[in-house]
Amino acid sequence: MATSYSTLPVEGADVPTIAEHLLHCKLNLTINRLLYANWPNEAVQRRQCNKAVDGGFNDPNTENLKVVDDATGELVGYLGLTRKYPPNAEKPSDGADKESDVPEIFVPHVYKAVVKTVGEVLEETNKTDHFDVTYILVKPSYRRRGIGSQLMREAFARAEDAGIPLNAMSEPAAYEFFASQGLKDTKHADIDLSQWAPSYSGFGLFRFRGLVWSK
């Protein structure tokens, strides 16, 4: 008998489980090996992941959905979908201040490069009213079962109902998934990780890609 999965709203009790799934992804992200001070600094990363997921759960502009294995009740997928509005034209930009204010858990020059690069990719899309795929996660042992696609259908439906685009910022490992869902490239920017890594250690270009879907 085929396993079935249900999509449900996230509850407060789900936050630690989702944060653990997010931590697993972050520990496998190449750039984070250079971004975080005292790598892997797992306790700090766990706190960061809990803070990020809890912040999304309490954000009125973010809809949080989970996928549950109906047979076991286990949470196996998560989508954080955030409504983003154009910035107030009268409000002065504080981007430079944010770039210079480096949390002590990060390596400063890497952090500043990431902030700058991500800002370049999002420069145009952030000017429009849109939905943003803030997070989409599937437990590794449940991947390639259509769970990510199930969550993306929810995101597409919200964007279509609102008549606005759906945007995503993709790290390299997630790009093929987003492309397979029909999202199109908007802009990309690269960071050369080799400049901060030991010679011949396998580090090279890391690409951030912006993608968009619209009906």
Image (cartoon, rainbow, N blue to C red):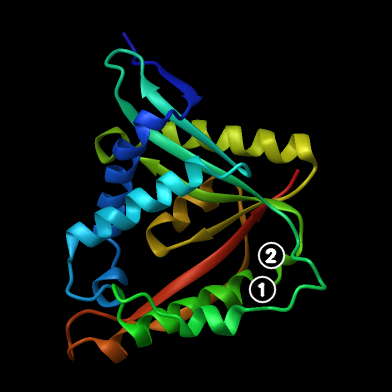
Residue 145 seen in this snapshot? no
Residue at x 69% of width, y 64% of height:
125
- Say left or right for 62 vs 89: left
Residue flagged by tag 2: what amino acid is it? Asn
Residue 115 appears at what percent x and percent y? 49, 77
Residue flagged by tag 1: what amino acid is it? Glu
Front residue (pair 73, 188) = 73
Instruction: Identify the element where label 2 is drawn.
Output: helix
Which residue carries the number 1 mark?
Answer: 123
Task: Classify 157 as above or below 58.
Answer: above
Crowding around mark 2 (Cα neighbors within 10 Å: few <14, some 14 to 19, many 20+) is some
Residue 204 appears at what percent x and percent y? 31, 81
Report the disc number at residue 126. 2
Q: Residue furthest top?
A: 1
User: Cβ–Cβ below 8 Å for labels 2 and 1?
Assistant: yes
The picture quadrant where one finds residue 123 is: bottom right
Residue at x 50% of width, y 30% of height:
150
Q: How many marks?
A: 2
Report the disc number at residue 172. none
Mark 2–mark 1 distance (CA, rounded to whole Å): 6 Å
The picture quadrant where one finds residue 172 is: bottom left
